[in-house]
Image (spheres, coloured by chain):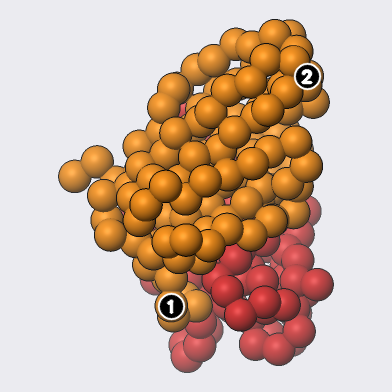
Amino acid sequence: NAGVTQTPKFQVLKTGQSMTLQCAQDMNHNSMYWYRQDPGMGLRLIYYSASEGTTDKGEVPNGYNVSRLNKREFSLRLESAAPSQTSVYFCASSEGGPFDQPQHFGDGTRLSIL
Amino acid sequence: AQSVAQPEDQVNVAEGNPLTVKCTYSVSGNPYLFWYVQYPNRGLQFLLKYITGDNLVKGSYGFEAEFNKSQTSFHLKKPSALVSDSALYFCAVRDMDTGFQKLVFGTGTRLLVSP
């Protein structure tokens, strides 16, 4: 019963490098999300996918791209990493549909950009 | 736009004492409110939600929250704190501006329970 799995757990990049953060859920959820968490700012939504085949921008999408590969997987890509993207990134999923369904979170990817 | 505010960065309480973590909200229409908890190096875990109905909502781990429409508040409470309750707590409100379930999170309140 893994829930939401994120890989890698830690990563250090140099400015300008690219990388993809992976996320997979085994709960058959329709909706998936990517957040970043920064001290004193709570969680901010980067992108979300309401259902397989759709993606939409959240509050802070600049510098990121996403792919909803299938119902299980939702990846986040940094094309040219910048120090301002140093953060902890969380993937989440929810059933979608009714508006009161809680989101289930992975344990995060801690990303440092030098 | 929907928003929530958590006015306290940190709350300190002694074990066995009651605890309250404050949250106020600003929404257009009826609010859908949530509390989540985050333990070190972990993702957020759902605690409870208010959609409609009773103003006192019971959730996981003995937590409850009181919805107060006149004060636009949704404070998290527990009658007797445990050291293991020490964590980061987030209040969230559903974003009503779209037809899709997005959440807007507060900045979080760190709860420290001393033995």
Report crowding for label 1: few under 14, some 14 to 19, many 20 or more residues within 10 A (C-alpha).
Answer: some
Report crowding for label 2: few under 14, some 14 to 19, many 20 or more residues within 10 A (C-alpha).
Answer: some
For the residue marked with disc 2, what is the amino acid?
Answer: Pro
- Report the residue at 37% width, 52% height from top: A70
Residue occupied by mark 2 = A83
Q: Is residue A85 visible?
A: yes
In the rendered image, residues at marks 1 and 2 fall on the same chain? yes
Residue occupied by mark 1 = A97
For the residue marked with disc 1, what is the amino acid?
Answer: Gly
Per the model, the C-alpha gap separating discs 1 and 2 is 37 Å
Q: Is residue B8 left or right of residue A31?
A: right
- Report the residue at 58% width, 23% height from top: A19
Given residues A106 and A66, the one toward you in this image is A66
The chain coloured orange carries which letter? A
In which quarter of the view is residue A28 placed? bottom left
The chain coloured red carries which letter? B
Q: Is residue B39 left or right of residue A26?
A: right
Given residues B102 and A54, the one toward you in this image is A54
Disc 1, SS = loop
Among numbered discs 1 and 2, the one appearing first in the sequence: 2
